[in-house]
Image (tube, rainbow, N blue to C red):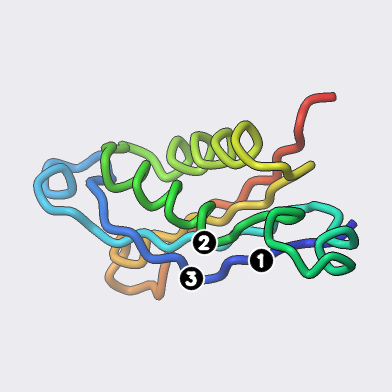
Amino acid sequence: MDKILVRGLKVTTIVGIFEWERQVPQPVVLDLEMATDIRAAAAADNIAATIDYKAVSDRLGDFIRSNQFKLIETLAEQCADIVLQEFAVSAVTLRVSKPEAIPEADTVCVEITRQRNA
């Protein structure tokens, strides 16, 4: 299976369980791997036959900015659901990183893989 990748999609939102995290938006960073067959798009050289990664990025960015989350696990699940429901992908692997979560660490993240129900 082919994959379309988006790496380092930065979005700011309210995310966290601590009171200070509920007051100030923080960055989250998404990495996506979307499984799809790209042969038809490559043969036709036509964006309509593939996954528009700009549309996916815009949709997820709008969703994340307009919502608040306590857990990055929740954010990841909801974003994976959007990708599977709204775009022609058979599976998505999504990593959500929260770089400001632990000052002594570069980042913390969760990574999930979800498949379209048959």
> Which mark lies nearer to you, 3 or 1?
1
> Which mark lies nearer to you, 1 or 2?
2
Residue 103 or 30: which is nearer the viewer?
Answer: 30
Identify which residue is drawn at 58% across, 60% down. 53
Mark 3 nearby-residue class (10 Å; few <14, some 14–19, many ≥20):
few
Quarter-wise, where is residue 48 in the image? bottom right
Instruction: Examine the rendered structure and indicate whether residue 85 appears above or below residue 44.
Output: above
Kind of residue at badge 3:
Gly
The answer to whether the residues at label 1 and label 2 have Cβ atoms under 8 Å apart is: no
Image coordinates for residue 117, horizontal then vertical, percent? 78, 25
Which residue in the protein does label 2 denote? 54
Q: Quadrant of the N terminus?
A: bottom right
- Disc number at residue 49? none
Q: Is residue 89 left or right of residue 19?
A: right
Q: Is residue 118 left or right of residue 70?
A: right
Q: CA separation, marks 3 and 1?
A: 10 Å
The answer to whether the residues at label 3 and label 2 have Cβ atoms under 8 Å apart is: no
Which residue in the protein does label 3 denote? 8
Residue 88 or 47: which is nearer the viewer?
Answer: 47
Q: Quadrant of the C terminus?
A: top right
Mark 1 nearby-residue class (10 Å; few <14, some 14–19, many ≥20):
some
- Disc number at residue 5? 1
Image coordinates for residue 71, horizontal then vertical, percent? 38, 39
Identify which residue is drawn at 60% across, 36% down. 86
Q: CA separation, marks 1 and 2?
A: 11 Å
Quarter-wise, where is residue 116 in the image? top right
Residue 50 or 108: which is nearer the viewer?
Answer: 50
| Sooner in the amino-acid sequence: mark 3 or mark 2 | 3
Kind of residue at badge 1:
Leu
Q: CA separation, marks 3 and 2?
A: 13 Å
Q: Secondary structure at mark 1?
A: strand
